[in-house]
Image (cartoon, grey):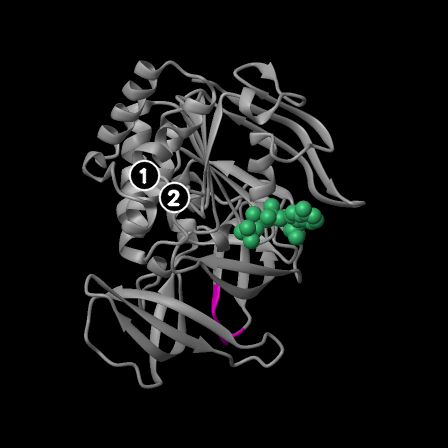
């Protein structure tokens, strides 16, 4: 087992910097997920930890040992790829044992490790098959098995479930969680899927355009995002953003007027310096934080365009747009499960000052 530390890690391709000084401390035995939109640099970060990509600046340590110049094979890591990377002409058993055999590992020890991996992953009955005779989920298990037999200090996963269908992804997600509990080793996992990040991680690193936006436990990021990017990225359906303006402030609260809702005002208690009167702000409201008319601090009228009924809850896709300057506003509102169709009917919902976040125009959170 080993901690992984990144200090001021920079990556340039040609003259172009794509990782701008990353600082991350992954604890021994921790499950950390790097998440962010396509192209934000998460795979590059993982590949630098693996040693498959040079670093342009900074330091990477694994188990307290600086590995900047250590070959991938000597870093005590094993990586699982999205593409499985299995040898098609070898059986599952041969795929699992190949790396160890090449390294001259003693035969009895290789057999022990392969047997253990096959038991952990419950693939013992597949050992004689070739990869083409396996389902996608079974192939991914074998790919993970190849990492397990190396008995690494750190597992690195690069979008391992992207090629699987939705149902299998959920199943494998649970398997990977189980594997982490069983092995207790450090795991670093890259995905663009925030649900995968939320369900797997002890802590999530949210990346955006080569910068770390926030590092935290899943529910801390959900409840307490540092900025609008994290607020919008974590959570499904996404947080709603409502244009607003500060129309008053005193020592304890700001008064905010919603741009698209005539006369909709609310007071939000704030600590610290309040934003100036006249400044434009954005309210962040989670879909589950809309209440019945009259129940909150401020009622807003919207037009219900489409309703999705998921059984346990319904999501209403609504629009508002009385103020041409503020632009149209699309809202996702969670309701109790119903079968009611939405046909452009008007509805009134209510928001609570204590259940919304406030961002300035740049997207920074106003405390
Ligand atoms: P995705 O989810 O799409 O895989 P990602 O967050 O993993 O994206 P990376 O693959 O790390 O992103 O790429 C980050 C940036 O670095 C992208 O802009 C990409 O085009 C660029 N990049 C990656 N590899 C190279 C390379 N070998 N040469 C030049 N640019 C590269």
267 or 47: nearer the eye?
47
**Mark 1 secondary-structure assignment:** loop
Give coordinates of residue 261: x percent, y percent.
49, 74
Side (left or right) of 296 relative to 241: left
Relative to 59, say whether 191 is above or below: below
Asked if residue 234 lies in the magenta stretch, the reply is: no
Side (left or right) of 207 relative to 302: right
Side (left or right) of 344 relative to 210: left
305 or 69: nearer the eye?
69
Relative to 93, say whether 190 is above or below: below
How dense is the environment of label 2, judged by Cα within 10 Å: few (below 14), some, or many (20 and up)? few
Q: Residue at x 49, y 53 (%)?
A: 233
Q: Residue at x 29, y 72 (%)?
A: 308
Relative to 264, say whether 69 is above or below: above
Q: What is the C-alpha distance between the residues marked 1 and 2? A: 7 Å
* The disc label shown at residue 91, or none: 1
| Range shown magenta | 260-265
Relative to 340, say whether 225 is above or below: above
Query: Does the numbered disc 2 mark a residue whose Cβ is under 8 Å from ligand 1?
Result: no
Using the rendered image of the protein, determine whether residue 258 is visible from the camera's viewpoint. Answer: yes
* The disc label shown at residue 226, or none: none
Q: Which residue is mark 2?
A: 89
Q: Say which quadrant the N terminus sits in.
A: top left
**Mark 2 secondary-structure assignment:** loop
Give coordinates of residue 341: x percent, y percent.
25, 81
Query: Does the numbered disc 1 mark a residue whose Cβ is under 8 Å from ligand 1?
Result: no
Q: Say which quadrant the C terminus sits in.
A: top right
Q: Residue at x 25, y 29 (%)?
A: 120
């Amino acid at each position: 087992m080993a901690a992984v530390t990144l200090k001021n890690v920079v990556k340039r391709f040609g003259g172009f910097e794509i990782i701008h000084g990353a600082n991350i401390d992954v604890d021994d035995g921790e499950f950390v997920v790097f998440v962010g939109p396509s192209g934000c640099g998460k795979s590059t970060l993982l590949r630098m930890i693996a040693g498959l990509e040079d670093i342009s600046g900074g330091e990477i340590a694994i188990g307290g040992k600086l590995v900047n110049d250590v070959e991938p094979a000597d870093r005590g890591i094993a990586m699982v790829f999205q593409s499985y990377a299995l040898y098609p002409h070898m059986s599952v058993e041969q795929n699992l044992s190949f790396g160890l055999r090449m390294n001259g590992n003693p035969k009895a020890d290789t057999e022990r490790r392969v047997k253990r991996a096959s038991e952990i992953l419950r693939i013992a009955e597949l050992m004689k098959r070739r990869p083409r005779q396996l389902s996608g989920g079974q192939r991914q298990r074998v790919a993970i098995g190849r990492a397990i037999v190396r008995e690494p200090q750190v597992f690195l996963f690069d979008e391992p479930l992207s090629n699987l269908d939705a149902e299998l992804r959920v199943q494998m997600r649970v398997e990977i969680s189980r594997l982490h509990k069983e092995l207790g080793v450090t795991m670093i996992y890259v995905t663009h899927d925030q649900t995968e990040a939320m369900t797997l991680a002890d802590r999530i690193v949210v990346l955006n355009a080569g910068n770390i936006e926030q590092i935290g436990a899943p529910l801390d990021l959900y409840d307490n995002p540092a900025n609008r990017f994290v607020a919008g990225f974590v959570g499904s359906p996404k947080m709603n953003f409502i244009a607003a303006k500060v129309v008053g402030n005193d020592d304890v609260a700001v008064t905010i007027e919603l741009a698209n809702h005539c006369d909709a005002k609310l007071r939000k208690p704030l600590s610290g310096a309040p934003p100036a009167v006249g400044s434009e702000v954005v309210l962040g409201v989670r879909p589950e934080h809309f209440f019945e008319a009259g129940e909150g601090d401020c009622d807003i009228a919207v037009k219900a365009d489409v309703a999705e009924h998921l059984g346990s809850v319904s999501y209403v896709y609504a629009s508002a747009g009385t103020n041409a300057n503020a632009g149209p506003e699309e809202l996702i509102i969670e309701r109790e499960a119903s079968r009611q169709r939405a046909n452009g009917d008007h509805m009134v919902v209510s928001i609570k000052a204590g259940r919304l976040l406030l961002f300035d125009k740049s997207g920074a959170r106003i405390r």
